[in-house]
Image (cartoon, grey):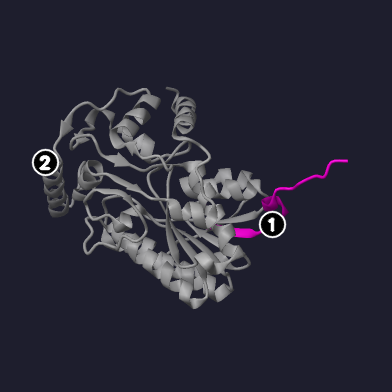
Amino acid sequence: MKTQHLDKKHMKKPLKALVTGGGGFLGGAIVRKLLERGDTVRSFSRGDYPALAKLGVEQIRGNLSDPDAIEKACSGVDLVFHAAAKAGVWGKYADYYQTNTVGTENVIRACLTTGIDTLVYTSSPSVIFDGTDMAGVDESVPYPDHYHAFYPQTKAMAERRVLKAAAKGLNTVSLRPHLIWGPGDLHFAPRILARAKKLRIVGDSTNMVDTIYIDNAADAHLLAADRLRESNEISGRVYFISQDDPINLWEMINAILHAGGKPPVTRSISQKTARRAGAFLEFVYRTLKLPGEPRMTKFLAAELGTSHWFDISAAKRDFGYKPEVSTEEGLIRLTRWLSEEFAL
């Protein structure tokens, strides 16, 4: 008679998890991964999402800047995945600060108040981006003295608070996924496709970047949470996570354009010209208080014209992360989804 061997992760006691931003791209993927393994999930978002309701997810509607709403959402759960944030390269500082920094402070306070001992925070590699090439750097790189956008500035402030919370008895890790993409993305890929005719290569087109497929990003969050609940050894640490396969930025953008049935980017401008254009457009938009956002900003010019890929050895070592879905397979899935979703 054969002995049946059960996967350890399926032998664990089901948990009740709170996912902030559960209706978003990454948050939704984390929700689905949790449900697949038998956990119960509660989502905290600003809106109601029918897709989550169909999955049986409890939804609490509220704003991250409301401490009472956050505390209510944290009541009775075992762990928190804090994925909600205000992203983008343009907007008011107060909006970024209230959502990203104050919102994270409220999540930390609610965890401590309600007795939650595990918090996985979704950060960003942009918190250490200083506008220059970053090739294969690890988590030892310090925060820069200056930021060119409010998003990385306020995310860095939030990350610092998460790390400090570890000293107060809250087991925390901060994950830094870079350029999350895949089926279900309503921002990164659709934004590229919408601007296909206006896109320009910035710089000499040789810059390499990290990306991460959506399922891999969600897997990393669950792996980090499980490790954190087993031992507080990794508490208070930050980790880069990616495809572990740096790719030329413009090859990636062209691959997404191809997946969406669009022609590749061929025209280019120098990084110096892009930065000057970004500075000028920022001045015009602020002075005239124009709606929307500039086509180019100083931060965007730096992001598009430099290399930024990272050493993920720590994530591999400390919680066993490895990308299960390759970039090639991910692009096949993205192409299929774009074709179905947008009838290409």
Residue beneath the point at 57% across and 69% down: 117
Q: What residue does disc 2 label? A: 273
Most foreground residue, 216 or 30: 216
| Residue 123 in picture, x, y percent from top left | 40, 57
The amino acid on which the numbered mark 2 sits, given as a three-letter code, is Thr
The amino acid on which the numbered mark 1 sits, given as a three-letter code, is Pro
Q: Looking at the rendering, in which quadrant would you find the C terminus? A: top left
| Residue 122 in picture, x, y percent from top left | 44, 56
Give the mark, 2 or 1, whose residue is nearer the N terminus.
1
Q: Cα distance, mark 2 to mark 1? A: 54 Å
In the displayed structure image, the side of residue 30 where residue 8 appears, left or right: right
Which stretch is magenta? 1-24
Q: Is residue 95 visible?
A: no
Residue beneath the point at 27% across and 61% down: 93
Q: What residue does disc 1 label? A: 14
Residue beneath the point at 30% across and 37% down: 249
- Badge 2 density bin: few <14, some 14–19, many ≥20, Cα 10 Å: few
**Of helix, strand and loop, which one carries label 1?**
loop
The majority secondary structure of the magenta stretch comes to loop
| Residue 158 in picture, x, y percent from top left | 38, 65
